[in-house]
Image (cartoon, helix red, strand yellow):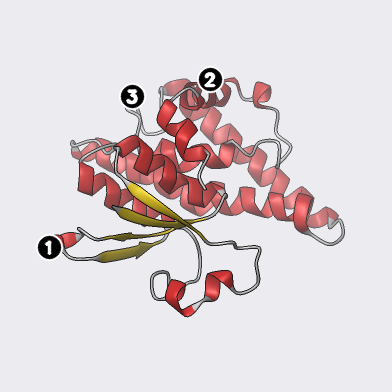
Amino acid sequence: MIDLYTWGTPNGRKVSVMLEECGLPYTTHKVDIGKANDQFKPEFLAISPNGKIPAIVDPEGPGGKRYSMFESGAILVYLSGKTGKFMPEDLAGKYDTLQWLMFQMASVGPMFGQVHHFLRAAPEPVPYGIERYSKEKDRLYGVMNKRLGDSRYLAGSTYSIADIATYPWVSRFDYHKTNLDDHPNVRRWYGELSARPAVQRGMAVP
C-alpha cells in the first residue's frame, strides 16, 4: 500500500490519477498547503525535503525496501517503471514521452501557476504580471493545440505520463481564463481524458 501525501492541486492530482490508472492501492494523507507550517513539519520534510506536495512512500520500493519520493514528474516516472505502464517501450517513444513530460514540468506548470497567482491570489492586481504570464499561457496552449492536431496524445499515438501530468493543469482552464473552444485539439484531448474513469477518480483526491 503506497502512502500518498497530497493536496487538491494540479501537481498533487497528477500522482493520484497515475495511481488510479495503474491500479495501485494507496492511502491518502492530506497535507494542507494553506495551513501554516503543515507542509514544513519535520515528519513531512523527512519524506519531501523541499516541503512540497506530492510525495509518496512505497513500502516495496527498489530492492523490496521502503522508498520515498518527492517531485511529481519523478514520481510519475517511478510509478511507470514500477508497473510498466504509460511509457512506451521503444526508445523513440520513451524519449518523446519524457520531452513532453518535461514540457509540462518546465513550462505548463510554472506558467499556468503564475497566471493563477496573479489572477486569484495576488493581494492587488498587477497588470504587468497578468499580461506577461497570460501571454505565455496562451502561447503554450498554441504549442499543445498544434501538437494535438498532429497526434492523438501529447507524446504520440499512446496515452502516457505526459498526458497524465498535463491534464490536471488544463483542467484549471477557468482559473487561467482560457476558452478551450479557442484550442479545438486541446478540447478534444481534454474531453477524451475527462471520460476516463481513473482520471475521474484521481481528480477527486484528496
Q: CA distance from mark 1 to mark 2?
A: 41 Å
Q: Amino acid at mark 2?
A: Arg
Q: Amino acid at mark 3?
A: Ser
In the image, what residue occupies the spot 50% across and 71% down? 51
Circle 3 — which element?
A: loop
Of badges 3 and 1, the one in the foreground is: 1
Circle 2 — which element?
A: helix
Above or below, 195 relative to 94: above
Extreme residue in the bottom direction: 42
**Residue 31: x, y in percent?**
53, 62
In the image, what residue occupies the spot 59% across and 61% down? 32
Provide the residue designation for mark 2.
Answer: 188
Hey, which quadrant is residue 39 in on the image? Answer: bottom right
Q: Amino acid at mark 1?
A: Gly
- Which numbered marker is on residue 150? none
User: Pointer 3: residues within 10 angstroms few (<14), some, or many (20+)?
Assistant: few
Of the image marks 3 and 2, the number of the one nearer the N terminus: 3
**Residue 104: x, y in percent?**
48, 46
Of the image marks 3 and 1, the number of the one nearer the N terminus: 1
Quick check: 200 left or right of 61?
right
- Which numbered marker is on residue 157? 3
Do the residues bearing badges 1 and 2 touch, measured as CB atoms within 8 Å? no
Provide the residue designation for mark 1.
Answer: 63
**Residue 96: x, y in percent?**
32, 39
Q: CA distance from mark 3 to mark 2?
A: 14 Å
Of badges 1 and 2, the one in the foreground is: 1
Of the image marks 1 and 2, the number of the one nearer the N terminus: 1
Hey, which quadrant is residue 158 in on the image? Answer: top left
Of badges 3 and 2, the one in the foreground is: 2
Do the residues bearing badges 3 and 2 touch, measured as CB atoms within 8 Å? no
